């Protein structure tokens, strides 16, 4: 059976998108965003982790992560920038600028309104237009995608790969922001999810040959096949030797190569992935805990409950109860 491990992870961690701000600026200007966990209860209360992204539809600006030794990134029309780890960041007309936080801007999203919201930062000079949105996902028990992404992701709009659909996103963003048609925000939110997948794919393609991590494992001929097999049949009673044989390596070579690239042994990876699958099913609030345990490969509900509590810190029933009352209550 063939499966796309990246797609399986995106599905299991429940990636969802929303577009909230249509921003018109003229130089000089600066906008500062707090850590995503601060605004998450207002912008995406049902998500454990929130990623903010910005699409530059015209003009240019600079983006920087606050409190990290990372060089500011110059953004031009068509560029997309995202902050996967939810860091506080700043967008500005020139590098090195800092602004004042205005949390009231985000609180406006708690009351029903037609989105995206329009913001104007008027300095009187050259114009830049941005569409700013958010992506929500689960971070626990196991999100190998999130664990492997850098603090800042940047795609150049001038690049050939994927540029056609980014142009379409930009046109949709500008049109929907101006016309505010019924269903427009849903369209933009789904496009935002697709855009993030493209960001990730481009990032994987840009990794150096000697890189480590989950993405490097996906790209490796042997380990990539192993990851696809594990995601295709996660409830199968895999043995290390059996998996090694499937990918054409000796048992010891496979174990060493998998751990070196992915960061954990293959069987530990499988166990963690099963728990993520279980968390996703529990969040749906339909199946019994015994059913979920069986679905993800556990022979008993008790064994599953112990493993889940070791990983997440609370039993499955408590996890589901908290998720049903407030996704925000699960944030660290």
Image (tube, grey):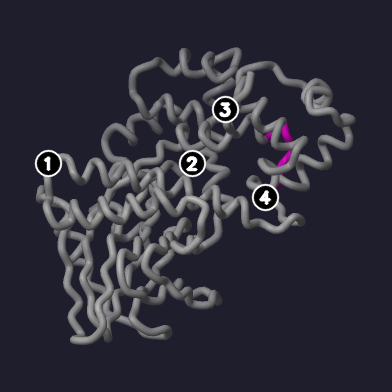
Residue annotated with mark 1: 182
Residue annotated with mark 3: 274
> Residues at badges 4 and 1 in contact (C-beta under 8 Å)?
no
> Distance of mark 1 from mark 3, alpha carbons?
39 Å
Residue annotated with mark 4: 213
Residue density around tag 1, few if under 14, some if 14–19, many if 20 or more, within 10 Å: few
> Residues at badges 1 and 3 in contact (C-beta under 8 Å)?
no
Sequence-wise first label, 4 or 1: 1
Image quadrant containing the N terminus:
top right
Q: Nearer the viewer, mark 2 or mark 4?
A: 4
- Asked if 206 appears above or below 25 in the picture, the reply is above
> Distance of mark 4 from mark 1, alpha carbons?
42 Å
> Residues at badges 4 and 3 in contact (C-beta under 8 Å)?
no
Residue 29: x %, y % from top left: 27, 82
Q: In the rendered structure, which segment of residues is drawn in magenta?
A: 263-268
Q: Nearer the viewer, mark 4 or mark 3?
A: 4
- Asked if 289 appears above or below 137 in the picture, the reply is above
Q: Nearer the viewer, mark 4 or mark 1?
A: 1
> Distance of mark 2 from mark 4, alpha carbons?
18 Å
Residue 178: x %, y % from top left: 14, 57
> Distance of mark 4 from mark 3, alpha carbons?
19 Å
Determine the secondary structure under disc 4. loop
Residue 253: x %, y % from top left: 88, 37
Residue 140: assigned label: 2
Is 26 one of the magenta-colored residues?
Answer: no
Residue density around tag 2, few if under 14, some if 14–19, many if 20 or more, within 10 Å: some
Q: In the image, is 229 to the left or to the right of 55? A: right
> Residues at badges 2 and 1 in contact (C-beta under 8 Å)?
no
Q: Nearer the viewer, mark 1 or mark 3?
A: 1
> Distance of mark 2 from mark 3, alpha carbons?
12 Å
């Amino acid at each position: 059976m063939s499966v796309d491990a990246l797609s399986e992870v995106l599905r299991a961690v429940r990636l969802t998108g929303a577009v909230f701000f249509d921003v018109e600026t003229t130089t000089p200007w600066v906008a500062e965003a707090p850590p995503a966990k601060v605004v998450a209860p207002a912008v995406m209360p049902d998500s454990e982790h929130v990623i903010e992204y910005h699409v530059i539809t015209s003009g240019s600006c600079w983006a920087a992560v606050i409190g990290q030794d990372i060089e500011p990134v110059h953004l031009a029309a068509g560029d997309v920038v995202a902050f996967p780890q939810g860091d506080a960041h700043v967008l500005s007309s020139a590098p090195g600028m800092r602004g004042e936080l205005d949390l009231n801007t985000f609180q406006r999203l708690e009351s029903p309104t037609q989105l995206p919201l329009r913001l104007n930062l008027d300095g009187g000079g050259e114009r830049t237009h941005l569409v700013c949105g958010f992506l929500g996902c689960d971070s626990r028990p196991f999100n190998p995608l999130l664990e492997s992404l850098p603090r800042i992701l940047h795609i150049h709009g001038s690049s050939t790969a994927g540029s056609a659909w980014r142009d379409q996103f930009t046109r949709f963003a500008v049109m929907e922001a101006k016309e505010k048609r019924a269903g427009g925000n849903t369209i933009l939110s789904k496009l935002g999810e697709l855009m993030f997948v493209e960001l990730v794919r481009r990032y994987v393609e840009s990794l150096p040959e000697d890189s480590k991590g989950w993405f490097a494992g996906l790209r490796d001929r042997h380990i990539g096949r192993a990851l696809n097999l594990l995601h295709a049949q996660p409830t199968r009673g895999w043995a290390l030797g059996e998996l090694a044989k499937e990918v054409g390596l000796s048992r010891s070579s496979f174990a060493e190569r998998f751990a070196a690239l992915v960061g954990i042994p293959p069987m530990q990876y499988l166990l963690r992935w099963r728990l993520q699958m279980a968390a996703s099913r529990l969040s749906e609030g339909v199946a019994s805990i015994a059913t979920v345990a069986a679905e993800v490969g556990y022979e008993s509900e008790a064994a599953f409950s112990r493993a889940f509590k070791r990983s997440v810190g609370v039993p499955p029933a408590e996890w589901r109860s908290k998720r049903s009352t407030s996704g925000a209550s699960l944030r660290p």
